[in-house]
Amino acid sequence: MSKQLMFVMRRPPYGSIHAQEMLDIIMVSAAFDQDVSLVFLDDGVYQLKNNQNPEASQLKNTAPIFQALELYDVKRLYVEAESLKERGMRESDLMLDVRVLPRQEIVELLNGGEMFFNG
Amino acid sequence: MLHIINNSSGQTPALQSCLLRLTAGSAILLIENGVYAAIKNEINNSILSSLPNDVSLFVLESDLDARGISKNEIDVRFIPTGYDGFVGLVERYPTVQSWV
């Protein structure tokens, strides 16, 4: 039986293992046909920022993993509008097609989740 | 004194804490996730509003590049610097404090 899984991404992409681990759990969940949603809040929006070049600093680039999510049928990606705006970013600064929603709608979305992974 | 910040303001309040305790003539260097604080935006404008006068601001270029932050996105008060500049700062300031 599939549950509505909510992955709440709040951390920047590098400097800790969190973002990477979240992506691993997301891929596994999707491979087992779970109902997966990704919600990017706060510094988590930096994970989707365009033009990252982490390899030059010997860091693993997460961009190819985000781009592969669609192949795993992970299509529900949500970004909080306020988190973007506070950081001086726009939807065009992001590497993927996402739905940008105002905070109030993000709250409603989260309330519809059945199981949460925060990282 | 040279103050080094390596976390984003969303992760820890290290930069805010450091700003409260700066003295004139000191410097701040942003590295790793600290570099997000150099971006021109609402959050950083608010945090940097308490920046005292006569404090030099630096940001490590390679960490900006890793995170997809271009030079024209950063606050003009920050001077982008390479690893050689980092070494130069450590030489110039007799003491270094890392706000981890």
Image (spheres, coloured by chain):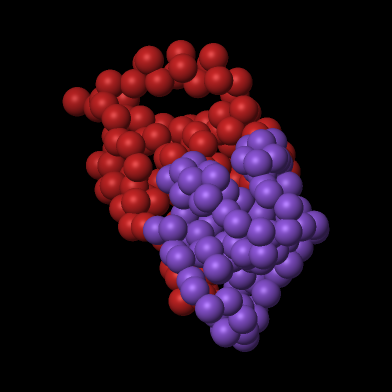
Chain colours: A red, B purple
Asked if residue B69 shows in the view, the reply is no
Q: In the image, what residue occupies the spot 56% across and 29% down? A: A80
Residue B35: where, in percent of width, then height?
59, 59
Q: Nearer the viewer, residue A72 or A63?
A: A63
> Looking at the image, which residue is at 46% across and 17% down?
A107
Residue B20 image position (x, y, % from top left): 54, 45
Quadrant of the rendered image containing residue B28: bottom right
Q: Say which of B89 and B34 sits in front.
A: B89
Q: Residue reaching furthest left?
A: A1
- Quick one: A91 or B81, which is closer to the camera? B81
Q: Where is residue B67 in the image (x, y as percent from the top left)?
A: 58, 60
Q: Is residue B82 above or below residue A112?
A: below
x then y, percent, for residue A85: 68, 33
A110 shown above or below A17: above
Name the side, left or right, on which A68 lies relative to B55: left
Q: Quick check: B43 above or below B23?
A: above
Which quadrant of the figure contains the N terminus of chain A? top left
User: Of all residues shown, which one is farthest toward the front?
Assistant: B24
